[in-house]
Image (spheres, rainbow, N blue to C red):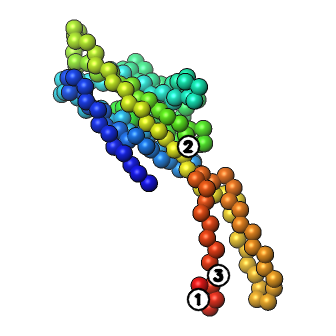
Amino acid sequence: MWCIVAEIQVEGFLHIQYDYDVTGIYGHQAELTCKVETEINKVIKEVKWYKLMKDGRKSVVYYYEPPRWDTPGLNYYNRVELADDGSSLVIYSLNRNDESSYRCDVTVMANETISSEIPQEMSVTMQLAVFVPPSDIKLSTLSSGNNLTLTCRSTRSKPSADITWIITNGGKS
C-alpha cells in the first residue's frame, strides 16, 4: 500500500500538510489529515469539510467557525469531529458510503479583532478508501475417515479476500 504525503504553500506562510490517499476499515475510524501551519500571528477562522459526490455536488461533512459554529453535516451527526489540531477530520464507524473524495477548505486571518488583512484561503482534496473485512466465516471439524466437502465464501469483502487452502498431514503442509 502506498502513502503519498503532500504539502502546499501559498503566499503568507500558509501550509497544509495532508495525506492524499487515506484508508480505513469498515466499522472503525479514519482520520483525514488537513494540518494547517501558518505564521504565529494567524489563527484558523474557518474550516469546511466536504464529501465530493460523483455527480459533481458536494455534501457538507463538517463546518467550523470559532467560536460560533462547530457543526457536523446532517448525515454525519455523532460520527465526525475535528482532531486536536483543529482542522483534520475524524470519521467514526466507517461504512461503505464513506468511501469518496473529500475536500478541506481552510481560511486563516490575523489574530486581531479588527484587521484590514485579506483572509488567506486554501483547499486540499484527498481520497478515502474503506476496506471491508470478510464476513460470515464458518469453520467446522471433521472426524477421521469421513468424507469432506470444503466450501469457502467471502462475501462483501473489499478488496476481495485472498483465500489460501493449506492441507496439513501430521504437522506437514
In the image, which is nearer the foreground, mark 3 or mark 1? 3
Residue 108 lies, in percent from the top left, at: 29, 21
Q: Residues within 10 Å of mark 3 (few under 14, many from 20)?
A: few
Tell me the residue that label 2 is attached to.
94
Q: Secondary structure at mark 3?
A: loop
Identified at 68% across, 59% down, the residue is 154
Q: Is residue 12 left or right of residue 99?
A: left
Q: Secondary structure at mark 1?
A: loop
Split into 4 quadrants, where in the image is the C terminus?
bottom right
N-term mark: 3 or 2: 2
Left or right for 20, reference 15: right
Q: Amino acid at mark 2?
A: Leu
Q: What is the residue that sits farthest to the bottom in this orientation?
A: 170
Residue 128 seen in this snapshot: yes
**Between 83 and 140, the one nearer to me in the picture:** 140
Query: Callout 1, which amino acid?
Result: Gly
- Rendered view: 145 above or below 142: below
How many marks the image carries: the answer is: 3
Residue topped by disc 1: 171
Residue indicated by mark 3: 167
Mark pair 3, 1: CA separation: 9 Å
Label 3 and label 2: CA atoms lie apart by: 36 Å
Q: Is residue 142 above or below residue 170?
A: above
Q: Residue furthest left?
A: 40
Query: Where residue 59 sits in the image (x, y, percent)?
Result: 54, 25
Provide residue 95's location: percent of width, then percent of height.
59, 42
Quarter in which the N terminus is drawn: bottom left
